[in-house]
Amino acid sequence: MRAALLRWFDLHKRDLPWRGQRDPYAIWVSEIMLQQTQVSTVIPYYRRFLKRFPTVRALSAAALADVLGQWKGLGYYSRARNLHRAAQAIVAEHGGELPRTAAGLRELPGFGRYTSGAVASIAFGEEAPIVDGNVARVLSRVRAIEGLPGDKAREQRLWAEAAELVKGERPGTLNEALMELGATVCLPKAPLCLLCPVSAHCVALKTGRVDELPPAKVRTARKRLELAVAVCRRRDRLLLARRPDAGLFGGLWELPTAPTPDGLAKLLGGTVGERLATIERTLTHRDLVLDVFPLETRKKLDRLDGYTECRWVTKAELEPLGMATAMQAVLGHAWSEGTRG
DNA sequence: TACCCGTGGAA
DNA sequence: TTTCCAAGGGT
């Protein structure tokens, strides 16, 4: 099975920008960006990021605000904060070089079990196993491993199988091959078993259970989160505020937000006008509803309760700030509203 | 352990 | 339109 995977990968692997070079830093960046994010989404971000921050030292010397600005729109922003923190730790404690083992990497922020194994195997050739969504699906089928995602016995079995499989020549390539197979052949629905290099080893195929393995994750219903957002303007500037580092949209900039319009008046003073727009966004676990209001106030507003800092910015100054996609949609309305009257 | 954290592609 | 879920980690 191992030989079949490697042979298949050598012939059929996609040509991706982080393949074909051994810079551990570049491999690391790609692994972080690819967490819960599809390849096609990552590619432009990866290129821009490596151009802007070409080395660990360059990243560690950058301001977090610039890193979050580069990450804008990619989601799961704690990844960017942890990447930056880890770069600083690598410079401060490891002479600017990534630790070369999974165990060493695991100590750094943002390196969990998967990412440590991925970087250690792909960049440094360690026989370190990985189990991501792709590998879990492939191994569930090939070995007919039962249980729901998250089930402890199932996870343990998957990691044990992955650990067994990675031993031997080219462990990093073997890991990449498993993921590539899951991403392009062993698909969640309607897998392409006729094209699969390991179909002869696949218990699920042999027993007609490909469609029932692995079982879908049980998902809880999304919660509705409705917020009032203030468009507070002075000449050609809007009032922006930066959220605390932890939690939803952590460390990102936004128009000041409160649970209700009254809450906005309390936060900013002044008078709330008629609703300008409502923006709805669906996140994995939330239905986000943003009601946008104009607000006029004469208060000084050089700081705001619940925010790390705030700033009056022009459209040009706003461009590089880290910001969630939902808030960028709100800003579209805010600027167009201003040019009208 | 259970829950939190974004976004977009695909069917 | 809705649902799934993607190279997961932190708390």
Image (cartoon, coloured by chain):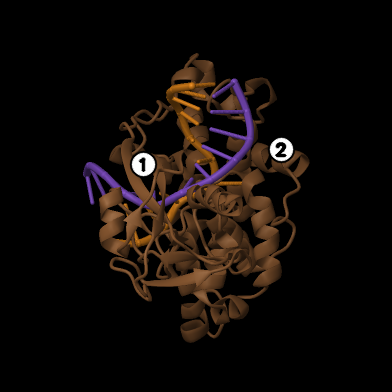
Chain colours: A brown, B purple, C orange
The residue under label 2 is A8
Image quarter where the N terminus of chain A lies is: top right
Marks 1 and 2: CB-CB under 8 Å?
Answer: no
Image position, residue A14 (x, y; %): 73, 43
In the image shown, does A33 or A266 lie closer to the viewer?
A266
Task: Locate residue A207, reporting x and y percent.
Answer: 48, 15
Q: In the rendered image of this protein, does residue A7 appear above or below residue C10?
A: above
Query: Residue drawn at (34%, 32%), measured in percent from left and top?
Result: A219
The percent coordinates of residue A248 (x first, y second) are: 37, 54
CA separation in Å, label 1 and label 2: 26 Å
Please name the residue shown 70% across and 60% down the image.
A47
| Residue at 59% across, 69% down | A317
Q: Which mark is residue A155?
A: 1
Look at the numbered disc 2 and give the secondary structure of its residue: helix
Vertical order, B1 against A240 (above or below): above
Choose mark 1 or mark 2, whichever is in front: 1
